[in-house]
Image (cartoon, grey):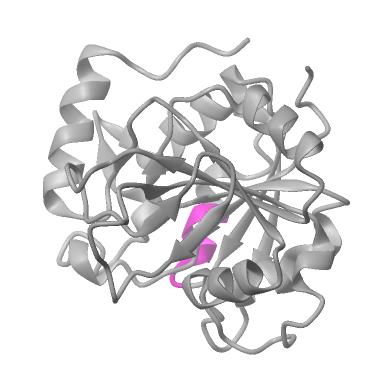
Amino acid sequence: MSLEDWPVALLAGGLATRLRPLTKKIPKALVKVADEPFLAHQLRLLRAQGIRQIILCLGYLGEMIETHFGDGAAYGMNIEYSFDGPKLLGTGGALKRALPALGDRFFVIYGDSYLPTDYAKVAQAFLSCGKPAMMTVFKNRHRWDTSNVEFDGKEILRYDKTNRDETMQYIDYGLNIFRPEAFANCPGDKPFDLAQFYPDLIIRNQLAGFEVKERFYEIGSSRGLTELDSLLRKSPAPAQS
């Protein structure tokens, strides 16, 4: 299926404190990975999946990102920008603010994630799930990070980043899909994080789950940054399709 009319909200507004001092003067999206800003690798990966529309949700030093990437034409994409404003809104608040630009269904990924999976397959699963939100999960078994999801093969039974136990063999992969109505009960222009939001969706039976088989990569930590740098030097992001 074509993903040309499926926007991606890319959450890149955080302070990136775990990468200091690298992020003291630049945002995480501009941190060099394999000699290029990380966001350049993300955009090429998304472009190769057939995605053309990006809404960058920005906060900390976001103007630097807009100056560098502009309208996205250099990547064969259309980039729009949604800024938090005078206070950081968190991942959930940033999404709520960007909803007018996102249409009736949209992907969400984080600004420090590199996710080489089949986005069209994820989109098809969402269209079939009948719920306003879907989280992709990966059977992590605490390997690359601490697992935080209990998943029965179809439904997300529990999501908790604080109180974890051995029933949680999966981790949220970082690629999610929403319809705007999922945020109907969320306050506007007030900070909140998606990590706080997912348990509420589970209680309301509004969060579907979909398992992906490809592992995730991230630059949220120095170890993750080093690992992804090595990967992309050996296997660069796919060329534009």
All told, the count of numbered labels is: 0
Q: Position of residue 46 (x, y in %)?
A: 57, 29
- The span picked out in magenta is 60-66
- Name the foreground residue: 241 vs 109: 109
- Name the foreground residue: 176 vs 199: 199
Q: Position of residue 148 (x, y in %)?
A: 34, 59
Magenta span: helix, strand or loop, mainly?
helix
At 19% from the left and 48% from the top, the residue drawn is 142
Rendering quarter of residue 1: top right
Above or below, 154 against 191 in this view is above
At 29% from the left and 75% from the top, the residue drawn is 163
Asked if residue 207 is among those painted magenta in the image, a careful observer would answer no
Q: Is residue 171 left or right of residue 87?
A: left
Above or below, 55 against 44 in this view is below
Quadrant of the snapshot with the C terminus: top right
Q: Position of residue 231 (x, y in %)?
A: 22, 23
Q: Position of residue 100 (x, y in %)?
A: 85, 64
- Name the foreground residue: 82 vs 195: 195
Question: Is residue 212 in view?
Answer: yes
Asked if residue 65 is among those painted magenta in the image, a careful observer would answer yes
Question: Is residue 83 in view?
Answer: no
Above or below, 174 against 241 in this view is below
Above or below, 151 against 41 in this view is below
